Image (cartoon, rainbow, N blue to C red):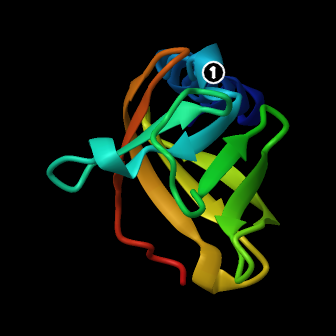
């Protein structure tokens, strides 16, 4: 029989070991991103940082992931002005992000394939919690 405190210590050590095996998300991820749909390939989406020189377009969607768990969805509205929707993100595994909004139709789930200061490439995943 394992003493109660020994079991708690084992559980705590296991949780800490698990948390330490997942590397932190790259710091470059935490900035505003704009969809560069001209660069999308094979179901993967490409985003560039706000201010990146892209071809003219009639409204581009984007988002911002913040370290505090906030996610801002920036979508082109009916007048081509950006509308912001606030949600919260959670990390799933080493490279997936699940985003939930008050309106479940806006929920997002994606895998991060590549991120640098000038490029974010993601693969949208099925939105399980719509």
Mark 1 neighbour class, 10 Å CA radius: few under 14, some 14 to 19, many 20 or more:
few
Front-most of 41 and 52? 52
Numbered circles on residues, count:
1
- Write the residue at 71% across / 76% down: 77
Q: Is residue 36 left or right of residue 83?
A: left
Location of residue 97 in the rendering, given as x and y in whole percent from the top left corner: 53, 48
Q: Is residue 82 left or right of residue 76?
A: right
- Write the residue at 43% across / 53% down: 110
Q: Is residue 78 above or below residue 48?
A: below
Q: Residue furthest front?
A: 56
Location of residue 22 in the rendering, given as x and y in whole percent from the top left corner: 49, 22
Image quadrant where residue 14 sits = top right
Location of residue 41 in the rendering, given as x and y in whole percent from the top left corner: 19, 47
Image quadrant where residue 84 sits = bottom right
Q: Quadrant of the N terminus?
A: top right
Front-most of 24 and 107? 107
Location of residue 115 in the rendering, given as x and y in whole percent from the top left corner: 45, 23
- Write the residue at 45% across / 41% down: 55
Image quadrant where residue 9 sits = top right
Q: Residue furthest left?
A: 42
Q: Is residue 8 above or below residue 58?
A: above
Q: Is residue 29 above or below residue 42?
A: above
Q: Quadrant of the C terminus?
A: bottom right
The residue labelled by disc 1 is 16
């Amino acid at each position: 029989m394992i003493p109660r405190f020994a079991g708690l210590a084992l559980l705590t050590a296991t949780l800490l070991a698990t948390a330490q095996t997942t590397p932190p998300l790259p710091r470059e991820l935490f900035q505003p991103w704009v969809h560069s749909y001209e660069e999308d390939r094979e179901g993967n989406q490409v985003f560039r940082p706000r201010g990146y020189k892209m071809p003219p377009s009639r409204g581009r969607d984007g988002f911002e992931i913040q370290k505090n768990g906030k996610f801002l969805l920036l979508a082109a509205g009916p007048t081509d002005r950006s509308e912001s929707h606030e949600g919260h993100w959670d990390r799933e595994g080493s490279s997936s992000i699940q985003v939930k909004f008050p309106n479940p139709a806006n929920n997002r789930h994606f895998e991060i394939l590549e991120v640098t200061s000038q490029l974010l490439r993601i693969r949208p995943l099925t939105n399980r919690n719509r």
